[in-house]
Amino acid sequence: ETRLQRLLFIAVSAGDAMTELSNKHKAEGKGISSSIGADEDGAEHHLAILCKSGYAMALDQMQRLQNVLRYKQIFGAAPSIQDANASLQQRVESLAVASTIGNEQAAGEVGMPEQDAPSASAIMSEVAAAPVSLDTAGTNGVMGQNAARHYSIHGIQCDDDWVERTQQQNSLKSEVLESRLDTSKSRLNKESIRAAYLELGNFWKEIGMLKESMRCHLRSRDFCTSSKQSGQMCLAVIRLGIDLRQFSYVNSYVTKAENTVNLVSSEPLTAAKLRVSSGLFLLENGNYADAAKKFTEVSIDLGQEFNSVMSPEDIALYGAVLSLAALDRSEIQKHVIDSSTFKQRLELLPWMRDAIRHFARAEYGEFLSIVDSKKGDMYLDLHLHRHVDKILEQIRDRCLVQYFFPYLSVSLESMGKRFGMNIDKIEDAVASLIEKGKIDARINSRDKTLVAKEVPNHRLETLKKVKCLGDTFMAETHSMILRLSCLDAGLVVQSDVNVGGRRGRGYRRGRQRPSLAEDMEVSSDDDNDMMVDYGEMGSSVVLDNPEEEGKVPAM
């Protein structure tokens, strides 16, 4: 599903760009065919090839997986019919809400009780009744509005016979899977019920019913009997949440998986997948710093295990770009440059590795030129395209701030040459930084220089620090010498110790307990070890050791 969404997004984006260029050429008196034929190496020709390739690959995947729903969304109807049936698709896909958070709460959201939810055959019949809008591709309906006018340019037509034949096959298969689930429920076998739910959920996902698939995977949670099964369920829900652009599910089930007993510690690959998913959630919410740390901490051992959501190259791209935009130089040094794990991942993107090397050397012009050259590829990324402008702006601002930091005054002309910008552009960029409060300086428009407002006297500050340290050292040394002198002269004040008698366990608090020597001195009044008084005998018998004496004398 993620691959299909990426293909459709690339195709629609290329088609939009191609349409924009063709409209521009028409305004100049040129047609689309003449502009393409005149210069086959032009941008419009390459966009047409990219658009056609994207649709062709997406069409092949839809037919291979029998994804009739998505096929009809893209190739099955004109935009007017799609808009007319948008409410039907919303109602069909909202059936998945039932039992996702709670049966009563979900039933209230859908508007019908859970027991009245339609069966799989009913859902398939509703889907077959009319084409629907593309609202599950993660693009907020953009594809459904624009796809129809793009694919027709390349001669792609809807195969109604294939659609009808595939819908019948899917309907039969869904009935078989539903019957298996009912049989498993009648036998009250938890493992069998869980397997039936997973099989049905995978089937819904293949044919494009993502929310129905989400419902099945969520219901399988009650029948998980081990932490491993719970982890698999959480990862399945996370994948579907990413495909549906419902990142609240992603964050919720990442947390549940992390709190599952012995899951993260016993399965490192699962921990890496959770970091990637958490990074996508943070990226979607604009938390670039935390997202960068998540992506840079992903283990290199993950490899292609999670490429259904994100490839290793995408992890390297996201981690590097977000780190450059949101982290300071010390954190970039720690998480990117000096990180043995992420350094290996950067080998997958040689251009990003070279760009980071230029950034570390403060060669900002070369660094920005490399990043700007890859801006087009970032715009075609499914998750990153909405943040490209903001991320690149933050990277440029960071480079300008770091370049000016060691200077008291700098020429805008030389600064513009360093960054590959003319004086007007560099002046506008610096003025924007001054307005944002990132640079405490002012622009001299006559001399075209940038001058720091308050020039710090580093020499005076250093002398003050040295004097403060010297005074502290002298005071501590004087106190130490005075104490040693008092100890040598015997001028030591000690507390009084009450040695008048022996204390028991209940001695009064606040008084010093006598030492062991004093205690023995007080208790040793006679040379006799033990005195035994036998009352009427009037004499005392000394018992040095009863064992040596043999026995106690008779009374």
Image (cartoon, helix red, strand yellow):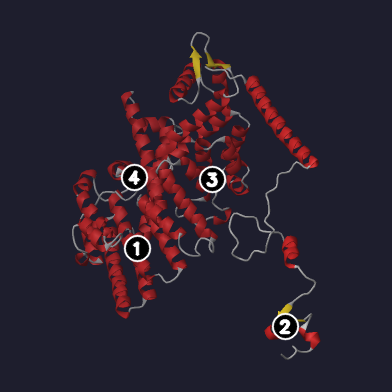
170 over 375 or under it: above or below: below
Front-most of residues 540 and 358 = 540
Looking at the image, residue 451 sits to the left or right of residue 182; the answer is right
Disc with the residue nearer the chain's start (4 vs 2): 4
Identify the element where label 4 is drawn.
Answer: loop
Disc with the residue nearer the chain's start (4 vs 1): 4
The reply to whether residue 424 is in sight is yes
Q: How crowded is mark 1: few (under 14 residues within 10 Å), some or many (20 or more)?
A: many
Whether tag 2 and tag 1 are in contact, CB under 8 A, the answer is no
Q: Which residue is drawn at 49% across and 16% down?
A: 442
User: In the image, residue 311 lies at what x, y percent?
Assistant: 50, 51
Instruction: Give the CA separation, mark 2 to mark 1.
Output: 95 Å
Label of residue 218 in the image:
1
Whether tag 4 and tag 1 are in contact, CB under 8 A, the answer is no
Residue pointed to by mark 3: 316
Instruction: Give the CA separation, mark 4 to mark 1.
Output: 24 Å
Looking at the image, residue 293 sits to the left or right of residue 337; the answer is left
Q: Residues within 10 Å of mark 3 (few under 14, many from 20)?
A: many
Instruction: Give the CA separation, mark 3 to mark 2.
Output: 101 Å
